[in-house]
Image (spheres, grey):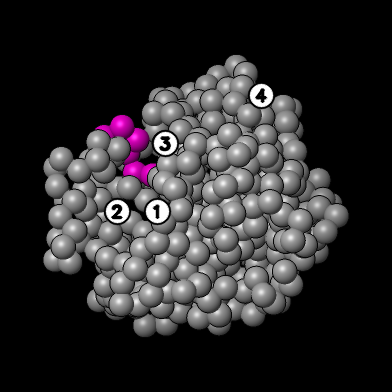
Amino acid sequence: MSLEQTLNDDEKLAELTLEELQQLVGLVDYDASQDPFPVSGWDALVWVVGNATQTAHFFQSAYGMDLVAYSGPETGNHDHHAFVLTSGAARFVVTGAYDPGSPLADHHRRHGDGIVDIALAVPDVDRCARHAAATGATVLEAPHDLTDQHGTVRLAAIATYGETRHTLVDRSRYRGPYLPGYVARSSTFVRRPGAPARLFQAIDHVVGNVELGAMDTWVAFYNRVMGFTNMAEFVGADIATDYSALMSKVVSSGNHRVKFPLNEPAAGRKKSQIDEYLEFYGGPGAQHVALATNDILGTVDALRTEGVIFLATPDSYYEDPALRARIGDVRVPIGELQSRGILVDRDEDGYLLQVFTKPLGDRPTVFFELIERHGSLGFGIGNFKALFQAIEREQELRGNF
Ligand SMILES: [Fe+2]
């Protein structure tokens, strides 16, 4: 599969060029014919939240997303509301219980706001589901069609860590706004004059937090079931402060469009941020979503204007002569990064700029990262220590450290 062929309809609609995508998410060429489980990209991140009506508004008003489709009681869905939002090639589906007896209400009671489905675009649902079953994955939904007047979508679903799933989606024969059962709906939210048209263009990676001792099991799962390869390996002291630590390994799809860092807690003198997540989410789950932007300064400024709060980075991070030596030349003066708390990391391929928000909901669980890549295919290993110290200050304020 050439890179050009991997550009999906959403990306074409978002007017992203191949070069932009390569730069944004570190896309690489690869031979899909040898891949037992070809994945072309992300389909959607499906959230369960306590109030989908308001979260959908928040993703529009603060994160600049566009409402494109809807399902709810007015469309015959008496179980829940579902709002489909996009930003460039990224698609979120925000769901919340309407019926008090909805399974979504139980899910939310257990986990709070979070991501339940990391849906992936695959060209051949049946082939993937067959391979998943043959390699020991739990197939939650066998391959099946959903059809309406806009065409047919083929779907299957497999289980991953915790109560998270991967729905496998082939929408190549479908022209509707999302899935059968959804109606097109546009945003009633009016952007501020001068606000950027789009604050992020794509999903870069989704991080999973799993229990102590489970990381290698899930790395092996993605290797065996989905043919993902190991991208980078961060272990032990690589990601440790004086007080807490974690272990992290990264697996990715052949074209690097879908990247899954997997974290587990490591022993430290105090409670790890991963332990805090596992306690408050009630088990393994998606920890953060990295949103790719080609203008992290403008994005951070726009998000701050809307009241989004980022983790603070200590001034000492920017004043450290070792940092300046490590990162070399980047496209903006360090002062511009410092005033926004943006972190920099460099590896042999280039550099990246990144910044992390506070948790999105009431529990100290899921949050966003913004990432602007300039050649680097990494995840900011050089920043982990600075980042963790910032997270630890937050944990301490919550009394969980
Ligand atoms: Fe990340």
Q: Which residues are magenta?
A: 109-114
User: Tags 3 and 2 in contact by the CB under 8 Å rule?
Assistant: no
- Using a 10 Å C-alpha cutoff, classify the residue at mark 2 as few (fewer than 14 neighbours), some (14 to 19) or many (20 or more): many
Q: Which secondary structure lies at badge 4?
A: loop
Label 4, label 2: how far apart the Cα atoms are = 40 Å
What's the CA distance linking mark 2 and mark 1?
7 Å
Distance in Å between CA atoms under marks 3 and 2: 15 Å
Q: Earlier in the sequence, mark 1 or mark 3?
A: 1
Between residue 231 and residue 220, name the one nearer to us.
Answer: 220
Looking at the image, is 185 positioned above or below residue 167?
A: below
Front: mark 3 or 2: 3
Image disc number at residue 95: 2
Question: What residue sits right under mark 3 in the picture?
Answer: 163
Element on which disc 2 rests: strand
Q: Nearer the viewer, residue 312 or 261?
A: 261
Q: Amino acid at mark 2?
A: Thr
The residue carrying pointer 3 sits among few (fewer than 14), some (14 to 19) or many (20 or more) residues within 10 Å by Cα, namely: some
> According to the image, label 4 marks what residue?
242
Q: Are marks 1 and 4 in contact (CB under 8 Å)?
A: no
Horizontally, residue 208 falls left or right of residue 302, namely right
The tag earlier along the polypeptide, 3 or 2, is 2
Spatial CA span between label 1 and label 4: 36 Å
Q: Residue at x 36, y 63 (%)?
A: 146
Mark 1 highlights which residue? 46
* Mark count: 4
Q: Nearer the viewer, mark 4 or mark 2?
A: 2
Q: Earlier in the sequence, mark 4 or mark 3?
A: 3
What is the x, y in percent for residue 383?
A: 68, 44
Q: Is mark 3 within 8 Å of ligand 1?
A: no
110 is within the stretch colored magenta? yes
Quadrant including the N terminus: bottom right
Considering only order in the chain, which callout, 1 or 2, is on the residue closer to the N terminus?
Answer: 1
